[in-house]
Amino acid sequence: MSERSEQLRAALAARLERVRGTMSDAEFSRLIEDVIRTTQRFEEIDAREKRVKSVSGLPTFKEPEARPR
């Protein structure tokens, strides 16, 4: 696991621990892993959107990627 993932894990676990309720250690760990993957995916999307090229000063946008149903 990367250093960034470890930092996210520690921060998220600390914040979510108080609302953990009756989750087992394994369930809580899976929740944290899911939140980490989601956070990293959002970061990738944000980074990709920042690299959108412009033409004549106006931004050009790509069509959103189709998601399988």
Image (spheres, rainbow, N blue to C red):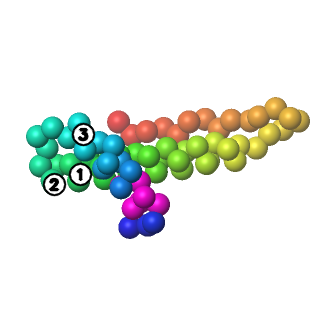
Name the image quarter holding the N terminus. Answer: bottom left
Secondary-structure class at tag 3? helix
Q: Which mark is residue 58?
A: none
What is the span of residues highlighted in magenta in the rendered image?
Answer: 4-9
Q: Are marks 1 and 3 in contact (CB under 8 Å)?
A: no
Alpha carbons under labels 2 and 3: distance apart: 16 Å
On the image, the x and y values in percent for residue 58 come to: 82, 32
Q: Closer to the N terminus: mark 2 or mark 3?
A: 3
Residue on which disc 1 sits: 30
Image spot of residue 43 (x, y percent): 53, 47
Single out the residue that lies furthest toward the top: 58
Identify the residue shown where x is 29% and y is 42%: 16
Q: Is residue 63 above or below residue 43?
A: above
Foreground pick, 60 / 9: 9
Q: Residues within 10 Å of mark 3 (few under 14, many from 20)?
A: few
Q: Which residue is mark 2?
A: 26
Quarter of the image where one finds residue 20:
top left
Front disc: 1 or 3? 3
